């Protein structure tokens, strides 16, 4: 029995929007504003805890949610029928500006820092996951308008690079900080990257072309994606076979990125700036496969169809779409094949700007800005093709209170942007406890867009443990 592929798309978005967090490298501005937590160094290599000569960062985790959709924008409850429906119009309106549902997490495996007075060294290792899932703008146009007004050379593109992307990689970093004088500190870090999994678009497209007289419509699919993984999965949907092989060696997919930072502090104020993950990213060379169309002649022509009214009252009219859906389902058959050119993928580059006023010896307040440039695929073969495909920012008003030399409380209110869309009020709170200046436990909950968790579009959570040696009093 043929499945309704468009309803499946909506259901996938509904599930992903509720359960998937986002942006593996998404940073908590509350953590950046902390003076006690050594992991603030990951956001600015010029930062080092002022009350410790040596720190050991034990395993910790960061989770981040960033979705354009929430439960209330996906589902609609009809009290008359006592049923819950997927609100297709709301989903299309929300996704019309190209936003993605993104999943990500990074695990801090271990970190180490050593302060020599005029300079300090840091070492860290992390495991990171980044997954993005978006709805192509052409598909939104088609579901909203059908093909009315799109004839001849006005082709509707149902599939583009915004559809899906996934990456799993490890990071080992060596950082160096230098105190130029009593006020100014600069820092730099080099990162060695090891890629374990990548799924990225390499030119896939699905187009619909309508004859000028609306007598026919042709769908043409070109499926072409790069797939690289430490787990080899070979799938052939035509022959209905799947083979799984787990490698016993580390993949040879390496890369390098760099961080730079500076911090200037007086008794009255502090300012800081950093650029994180500047560089080419990961070079995928080992175990490359391509996901391609299973059929050589991958097009289908429909005649006598009128899809201008494909959407009726926020739901799909199956009388217009069943033939189209059945045919597109057949076109979507794919297979994975060995081989493919080596390629690079970029890690989103981050920029941080901060300014804090020291109101008293233990109370500070100020503003922090965090921006991310998602550059997508940066090199295929010998040609660089860098382009900015997304911009995300978080601007926070922040207050920090240090009590009794071992308690730090940080609170914030943030304004978020996602590809030009604004989210105006997102509070956050963080607590860091360092009893005896030796053992530290911390938790940061940032960018809380809604206290009703299933309606939250943004949420960042960090938890972990640290140990300090050679401690001294701090501001």
Image: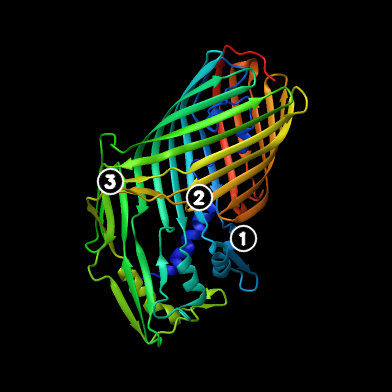
Quadrant in the picture for the N terminus: bottom left
User: Colour mode?
Assistant: rainbow
In terms of image quadrants, where is residue 52? top right
**Label 3 vs label 2: CA separation?**
30 Å
Q: Residues within 10 Å of mark 1 (few under 14, many from 20)?
A: some
User: What residue is rendered at 24% in x and 60% in y?
Assistant: 240
Q: Is residue 113 visible?
A: no
Q: Return the x and y of residue 39 as percentages of the image width and height.
A: 55, 28
- First along the sequence among labels 1 and 2: 2
- Write down the residue under mark 3: 342
Vertical order, 421 against 259 (above or below):
below
Q: Quadrant of residue 96?
A: bottom right
Mark 3, secondary structure of its residue: loop
Apparent side of residue 183 relative to residue 325 in the rendered image (left or right) = right
Q: Position of residue 137 (x, y in %)?
A: 48, 65
Q: Which quarter of the figure has residue 361?
A: top right
Left or right: 317, with 344 as reference point: right
Question: Observer-nearest residue: 369 or 294?
Answer: 369
Label 3 crowd bin: few (<14), some (14–19), many (20+), radius 10 Å: some
Position of 252 relative to 36 (above/below)? below
Image x and y of residue 219, in percent: 34, 74
Query: Can residue 175 be seen by looking at this rendering?
Result: yes
The numbered mark at residue 72 is 1
Bin the neighbour count of mark 2 within 10 Å (Cα to Cα): few under 14, some 14-19, many 20 and up.
some
Please give left or right for residue 47 compared with residue 348 in the image: right
138 versus 58 height, above or below: below
Cα–Cα gap, marks 1 and 3: 43 Å
Going 47% across and 58% down the picture, which residue do you hit? 134
The residue singled out by tag 2 in the image is 20
């Amino acid at each position: 029995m043929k499945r309704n592929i468009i309803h499946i798309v909506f259901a996938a978005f509904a599930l992903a929007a509720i359960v998937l967090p986002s942006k593996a490298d998404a940073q908590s501005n509350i953590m950046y504003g902390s003076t006690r937590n050594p992991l603030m160094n990951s956001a600015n290599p010029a930062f080092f805890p002022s009350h410790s000569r040596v720190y050991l960062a034990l395993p910790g985790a960061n989770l981040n949610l960033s979705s354009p959709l929430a439960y209330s924008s996906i589902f609609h409850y009809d009290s008359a029928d006592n049923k819950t429906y997927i609100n297709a119009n709301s989903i299309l309106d929300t996704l019309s500006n190209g936003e993605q549902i993104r999943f990500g997490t990074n695990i801090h495996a271990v970190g180490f820092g050593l302060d020599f007075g005029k300079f300090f060294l840091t070492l860290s290792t992390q495991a990171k996951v980044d997954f993005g899932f978006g709805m192509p703008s052409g598909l939104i146009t088609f579901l909203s308008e059908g093909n009315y007004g799109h004839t001849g050379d006005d082709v509707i593109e149902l599939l583009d690079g915004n559809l899906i992307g996934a990456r799993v990689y490890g990071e080992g970093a060596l950082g160096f900080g230098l105190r130029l004088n009593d006020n100014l500190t600069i820092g730099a870090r080099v990162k060695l990257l090891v890629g374990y999994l990548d799924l990225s678009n390499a030119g896939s497209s699905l187009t619909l072309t309508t004859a000028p007289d609306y007598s026919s419509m042709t769908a043409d699919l070109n499926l072409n994606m790069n797939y690289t993984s430490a787990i080899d999965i070979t799938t052939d949907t035509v022959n209905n076979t799947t083979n799984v092989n787990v490698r016993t060696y580390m993949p040879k997919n390496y890369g390098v990125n760099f961080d730079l930072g500076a911090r200037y502090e007086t008794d009255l104020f502090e300012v800081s700036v950093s650029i994180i993950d500047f560089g080419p990213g990961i070079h995928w060379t080992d175990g490359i496969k391509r996901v391609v169309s299973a059929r050589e002649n991958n097009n289908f022509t429909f005649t006598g169809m009128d899809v201008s009214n494909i959407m009726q009252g926020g739901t799909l009219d199956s009388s217009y779409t069943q033939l189209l859906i059945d045919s597109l389902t057949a076109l979507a058959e794919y297979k994975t094949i060995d081989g493919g050119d080596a390629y690079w993928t970029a890690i989103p580059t981050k920029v941080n700007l901060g300014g804090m006023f020291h109101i008293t010896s233990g109370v500070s307040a100020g503003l922090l800005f965090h921006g991310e440039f998602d550059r997508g695929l940066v090199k295929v073969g010998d040609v660089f093709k860098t382009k900015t495909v997304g911009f995300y920012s978080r601007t926070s008003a922040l207050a920090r209170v240090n009590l009794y030399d071992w308690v730090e409380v940080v609170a914030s209110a943030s304004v978020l942007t996602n590809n030009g869309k604004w989210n105006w009020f997102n509070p956050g709170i963080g607590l860091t406890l360092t009893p005896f200046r030796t053992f530290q436990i911390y938790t940061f909950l940032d960018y809380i867009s809604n206290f009703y968790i299933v309606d939250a579009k943004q949420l960042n959570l960090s938890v972990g443990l640290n140990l300090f040696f050679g401690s001294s009093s701090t501001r």
